[in-house]
């Protein structure tokens, strides 16, 4: 008998101060571990991006958050690829020297890693990204010139034939000092993450192709008390390498046959029902922080026969538990426990059978009384 591939979705929402996954690539060890106990791991840039650090996970699928929501809803499927041609957008607001640092990083991925990049494009106006903080403490942001971003993406898609889009936007260096200090010392919320998500969501929603973002910032002064979880962001001048690596193998989005739609650039991403396309109803399990269950993906997966595993140890600024939403979930304390649940589930073993005592069956019907 041949079993279908065991598929797991790992989500750590961005900009919510997650104890694990709220920093630069610090959820990568979790992704690496889970990838060893499943056939297919579907996750998103916040989990796999580690600035200049990254890790090749052959069975991992790098899916931007908006695309992941559409996948969970059953609207879009994921088609694996061998390689994407990645287009690079640079914010006109980036200073010449900092722009050159990012271009050199992009060239390095071409020469050293063999990535396929188009020629880059500058936005026709500064993007003017503004950062915001919600009352809950989570981060978000706005783009002053979103049309400029979309025009640049459309040019790369239609003229340079880009199959995925990387964006580098200039962020202010005068961030709130207390928030930044807390983050660098492993205690705060990433002040950039929410705005980054807005940028990538906009492109994916409009054009239906993979996209991810890397912020442009000047290097910070040396801090001898830096948290190891924040250290990956302080290795150099750019966070771009991990984004280009992720996008180079990101699955493409497809629609079911007869439901095709075209993005603003005219690209058709209705690829039918190819046998290798993954659909949301094929997901066996999802792993999520216990207090961050309010996202669209989790709500959609809760309507399927998907096992939802929540991790209490990964605290966030949110308080949206599965109980508050009426979602059935298996609650564990740590990702180590979550790995055990996944192994048992894949093997078709009831978790209760692994406990020291097993209760007797009870009669379900009142007739037994």
Image (cartoon, rainbow, N blue to C red):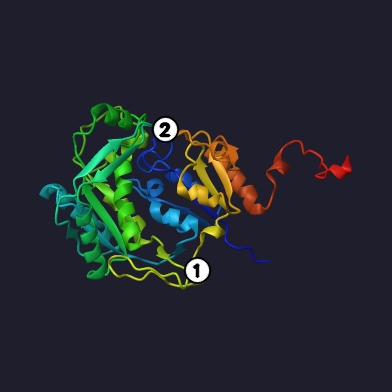
**Which image quadrant for residue 269?**
bottom left
Query: Which element is circle 1 on?
Result: loop
The Cα atoms of the two marked residues, 2 and 1, are separated by 38 Å
Query: Which element is circle 2 on?
Result: loop
**Which image quadrant for residue 325?**
top right
Instruction: Give the vertical position of 356 relative to 212 (above or below).
Output: above
Quadrant in which the C terminus is drawn: top right
Residue 275 screen position, x and y as percent:
52, 71
Tell which circle, 2 or 1, labels the residue nearer the N-terminal end.
1
Instruction: Give the vertical position of 110 relative to 22 (above or below).
Output: below
Quadrant in which the N terminus is drawn: bottom right
**Which image quadrant for residue 56?**
bottom left
Point 41% across, 62% down: residue: 251
Residue 359 screen position, x and y as percent:
79, 38
Residue that mark 1 sits on: 276
The reply to whether residue 69 is in sight is yes
Residue that mark 2 sits on: 317
């Amino acid at each position: 008998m041949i079993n279908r591939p065991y598929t797991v979705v790992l989500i750590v929402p961005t900009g919510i101060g997650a104890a694990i996954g709220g920093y630069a690539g610090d959820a990568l060890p979790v992704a690496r571990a889970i990838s060893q106990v499943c056939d297919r791991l579907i996750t998103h840039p916040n989990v796999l991006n580690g600035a200049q650090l990254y890790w090749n996970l052959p069975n991992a699928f790098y899916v931007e958050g908006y695309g992941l929501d559409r996948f969970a809803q059953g609207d879009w499927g994921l088609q694996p690829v061998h390689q994407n041609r990645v287009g690079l957008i640079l914010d006109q607001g980036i200073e010449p020297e900092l722009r050159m640092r990012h271009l050199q990083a992009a060239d390095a991925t071409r020469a050293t890693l063999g990535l396929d990049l188009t020629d880059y494009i500058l936005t026709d106006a500064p993007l003017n990204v503004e950062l915001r903080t919600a009352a809950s403490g989570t981060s978000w942001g706005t783009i002053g010139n979103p049309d400029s971003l979309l025009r640049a993406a459309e040019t790369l898609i239609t003229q340079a034939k880009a199959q995925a889009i990387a964006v580098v936007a200039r962020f202010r260096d005068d961030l709130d000092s207390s928030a930044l200090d807390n983050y660098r010392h492993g205690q705060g919320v990433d002040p950039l993450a929410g705005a980054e998500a807005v940028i990538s969501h906009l492109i994916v929603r409009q054009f239906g192709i993979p996209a991810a973002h890397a912020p442009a910032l000047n290097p910070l002064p040396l801090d001898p008390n830096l948290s190891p979880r924040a250290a990956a962001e302080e290795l150099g001048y750019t966070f771009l390498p991990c984004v280009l690596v992720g996008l180079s193998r990101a699955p493409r989005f497809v629609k079911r046959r007869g439901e095709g739609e075209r993005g603003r650039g005219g690209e058709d991403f209705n690829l039918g029902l190819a046998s290798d396309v993954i659909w949301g109803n094929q997901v066996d399990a999802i792993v999520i922080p216990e207090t961050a269950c309010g996202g669209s993906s989790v709500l959609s997966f809760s309507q399927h026969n998907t096992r939802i595993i929540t991790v209490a140890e990964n605290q966030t600024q949110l308080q949206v538990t599965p109980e508050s939403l009426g979602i059935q979930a298996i609650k564990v304390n740590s990702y180590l426990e979550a790995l055990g649940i996944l192994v048992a589930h894949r093997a078709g073993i009831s978790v209760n059978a692994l406990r020291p005592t097993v209760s007797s069956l009870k009669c379900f019907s009142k007739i037994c009384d």
